[in-house]
Amino acid sequence: MRELHLSSDDGATADTLQRLSSNSPGGILCPRLERLYWDIGGTDSTLSFFRLFLSPNLKEVALYTDPFLVPVSPNLPTDVIQIISFLPTSLEDVLFECRHMDDEALVDAMSSFACRCGPSLRSFSAWLPLSEAATQHVIQLPNLCSWTVAHGPPRTIPTPILPSLEELQLDNPEALPWLHLLASHQDGILRDASIRESLKYITCPGDTIVDPTLLSFMVTFRNMVVLRIQAYCPEAEGCLFRLTDNDMEKFAAALPRLEILELGRPCRSNSCSNTVASLLPISVRCLDLTVLEIHFNTKTIVADMQRLLNRAAGSDKAKCKLSHLKVGNLPLEVRREDIEIVAMGFKVIFPSLEVAGDYGCWRALRSKLGD
């Protein structure tokens, strides 16, 4: 067996594991195991048997809990700390997403493990903040290509850092200063500015304000393929999307390799400055784009689309094959007789578009797009 998934629903009780361990050679149940994925929420009675799965061939370990459930056992953090102490430092991929365990000892244990990790580590995902020493060690690992970070940069930055990074996930707003650091031109921090070429996947957390400052960091990574900003506009605080048509045109021109672009879930406020005109340069410049999530003001969408059709804008240029436009809660109030104009405009911008919204006028538009 090379891969194993365990959870509380699998019926792997402590008694079962005890019986299996008595017949396992060398105290290892699966000597060829390479990848272990364990939902440890609610399974604390079996955690003491973790050593049974420490195969000498183990390359990947993922420990996680359901993010919507608080662990029922007060002993779980203690058990997890012990597991972390057992983890081999030769692992290539580590994922630790055990929410609702804000334990200082757990932070210390994860930081201690991170400090021991060797050059084999390729991906490291932990929702816990790491100590300064642990962070400094991790960002100097030569083969780290994927990193999920929950805290800001350390006070002291070693040089160079993150020479092989391809994927960066910022787990909460406190981690956003990493973008400024990695996009900067400080001498010595980046090895020949390699990260500005290698970084292809970026995920930003909720509450991220989507404005020109943020985009000025993003366009530094000119080979970016996937950008996901998981912002959700709080109704009480207003829209977090603060870009214009001109901003989006410059952004699309700077990042032509984009395949997935998600700039926050469109909200009900319909107060942003950019319009559907911002979608055309995205389609023309980013020919590999297949998924798009973006705010755009729909109050004047009929006139905007009619203007685009009258000018035959972009008619002589290739367009992307976008099939999925995410409109979230964006309102669309269009008279029945004007739906055709809006549909024709969308077909000009995105010839392969199949999916728009599934409510109100979006549903009627969806039907027209399918004709």
Image: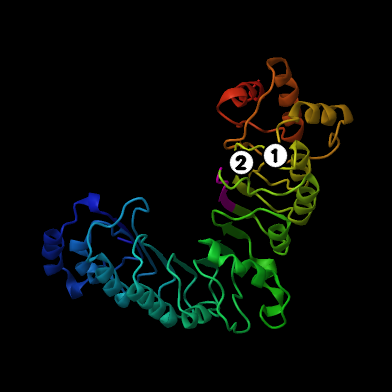
**Screen quadrant of the C terminus:** top right
Where residue 280 appears, as percent x and y from the top left, is: 77, 40
Residue type, numbered disc 2: Pro
Q: Which residues are magenta?
A: 229-235
In the current view of this chain or complex, which residue is farthest to the top?
A: 337
Residue 254, quarter of picture: bottom right
Q: Which residue is pictured at 63% across the width and 36% down the height?
A: 323
| Residue 296: numbered disc | 1
Dot 1 amino acid type: Phe
* Res 195 visible: no
Q: Is residue 51 above or below residue 44?
A: below
Q: Name the residue beneath numbered marker 2.
A: 266
What residue lies at 69% left-to-right and 67% top-to-bottom?
197
Closer-to-camera residue (253/229): 229
Tell me the element at label 2: loop
The reply to whether discs 2 and 1 touch (Cβ–Cβ < 8 Å) is yes
Q: CA distance from mark 2 to mark 1?
A: 8 Å
As drawn, 252 above or below 116: above
Question: Is residue 231 rendered magenta in the image?
Answer: yes
Give the secondary structure at mark 1: loop
The label shown at residue 72 is none
